[in-house]
Structures are given as C-alpha cells and as structure tokens.
Image (spheres, rainbow, N blue to C red):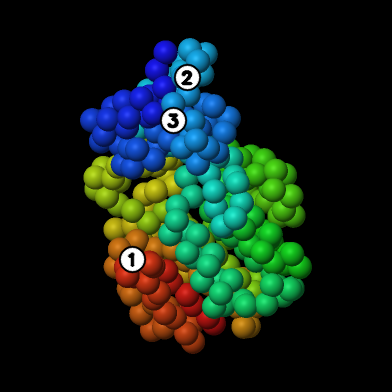
Amino acid sequence: MQSVLEILDKCAGYFASKGVPDAKLDAQILLAHALGCKRLDLFLRFDEPLPETRLSVFREMAKRRAKREPLQHIVGTVEFFGLTLKSDGRALVPRHETEELCDIITREIFTDKAAEISVLDLGTGTGAIALALAKYFPNAKVAAADLSEEAIALAKENAEAVGANVEFVKSDWFENISGRFDLIVANPPYLTDAEVAAAEPEVRDFDPVNALVSPDNGLADLRKILRGAKNFLNENGTLACECGVGQPEVLAKEALENLGFSRAESICDLSGRQRFLVCRP
C-alpha cells in the first residue's frame, strides 16, 4: 500500500507531464479533497498508507485534472473574496483579478461598510461579485443580471449557500433593468477568438465561450455597458469594469471624449497591467 507522500509525488510528476500549472499544489488539493481533510493536514500524514477506496476516488479526480479540467470544477468550489462558492461549467470560474476589482470597490470607492448603496452586477455568472459585495455591505441593495439562465441558477444556489440577499434578473446587459444605482459593476466578455484559442485548456475547453469572447477586438460588450451606464447611474454613481489588455485606456478616453463622463480612469491590477476601468457621470 502506497503512502500519502508517495502518491503525492507520483501525481505531481504526472500532472507536470501533462502541463498542469502548479502540479504539486493541485495534487495536494485533490488528495486532501479525496481524504476529506485540509491540505495542510497532509503534511502530518505523509507516512500514512492510503486505503484503496480513497485512492480510487483520488485517481478519478487526478485523471480529470490531467485532462486540464479546472480544479474548481473537480472539487466543486472556489474561494472568492472570503466566500466559498459552487463552481461548475455553467459559468466562468471566478478569477483573482476579479477579486482585485472587489478590493478596489471596497477599499477605494465605497469605504464605509455600513453604506446603504444600490449595486448592479452585470453578467454575474457564479454571482461572485454580487455576493461578495452583498456580504461586505450588509445594508446594500444588490441586483445581479445575466443572460444565461444556467448561470442565474448557479448564482442563486450560491446566494442561498452564503446567505446573501440578492435580486436576480435575466437580462442582456441593461435590457430588463430598471431604476438607478450607486454602483454598476461588470466583468463582461472581453477576449478575442484568437486570445481564447491561445488560452490555457482550462479556459479554452471548459469556460462558456459566450462569457469569454466579444466582437470588435473584445470591446463590443464593454462599449455596450459604457454607453448604457449613464442612464442607470445615480448622479454620484460609479461604473467599475474588468477589461482586457489595452482596453481600459481606450475606453476611458471614449468615456471622457464621446460619452459625457466627468471622470474616467484606468487602474492596474497587482501585476501592473492596466485591467480595470472606473467611470463617474
């Protein structure tokens, strides 16, 4: 019978041969999930023999990861801004960059956790942004929209699981939206077909393509949101969007010169890349 350490070493090597990023870490996460323990607990169990029943479960998960299925789909959850959310093929796996957008909103735009703000999350997917903001701002009124009924179903499951009060609506961006908001936030499709084709298999083969790709060099959906936002923002409201490479600067210029926004800025992510667009009427 093989030990926990032996299994981890073999799996890490197997993942590396398949091009899996963070092969060692992923092996640890999957084995901990198979054993029903925390990843750090594995370090206290290195010499422990692995029962065949648990090894069988682990092997099936390892095969899926070797085919580059997202780790979050295999374990069924993703951590996002302090929340544990269900993750599957119905919506994009929430990314760290999107957590950075939530951090900018809570740290720089609305600094009062007790603020009674109204929020609209466009293209909510798993519900990650809407739920993170609803939990962070307990007095906020949060609405979340998506065109995909499957995504909305997943977001509702997550809302129930984390105990967040969010109103969900099926809408093609602003189509079925009414009222005005203090904050409109969006992580829309912003990639080109070529960028998706060149992406890692976890993205290319498993994320819904309609949540990734946008026409007009990835700018079409961002422009729709930018053009419609002023009709739904309060006087002192804010639009905050995640964008692709080189897009925030282009959109900020358009917002100021063509769309009548008084302020528009491009903000870098932690890697120093221009990633976020923040505009005010």
Instruction: Name the foreground residue: 90 vs 218.
Output: 90
Mark positioned earlier in the residue sequence (1 or 3): 3
- Residue that numbered label 2 is attached to: 50
* Residue 46 image label: 3
| Distance between mark 1 and mark 3 Cα atoms | 35 Å
SS label for mark 2: loop
Q: Where is residue 208 in the image (x, y as percent from the top left)?
A: 43, 40
Can residue 88 be seen in the rendering of this structure? Answer: no
Give the residue at x 67% y 77%.
112
SS label for mark 3: loop
Can you say whether 228 is above or below 112 in the image?
above
Give the residue at x 33% y 53%.
191
Count neighbours of disc 2 (C-alpha within 10 A) and say few if under 14, some if 14 to 19, many if 20 or more: some
Are circles 3 and 2 on residues that touch, CB within 8 Å?
A: no
Give the number of callouts: 3
> Amino acid type of disc 1?
Ser
Are circles 1 and 2 on residues that touch, CB within 8 Å?
A: no
Question: Is 177 on the left-hand or right-hand side of 243?
Answer: right
Give the residue at x 74% y 55%.
165
> Amino acid type of disc 3?
Phe
Q: Which of marks 1 and 3 is in front?
A: 3
> On the rendered image, what quadrant is the C terminus found in?
bottom right
Can residue 213 be seen in the rendering of this structure? Answer: yes
- Residue that numbered label 1 is attached to: 271
> On the rendered image, what quadrant is the N terminus found in?
top left
Q: Position of residue 178 (x, y in %)?
A: 68, 63
> Amino acid type of disc 2?
Leu
Mark positioned earlier in the residue sequence (1 or 2): 2
| Distance between mark 1 and mark 2 Cα atoms | 40 Å
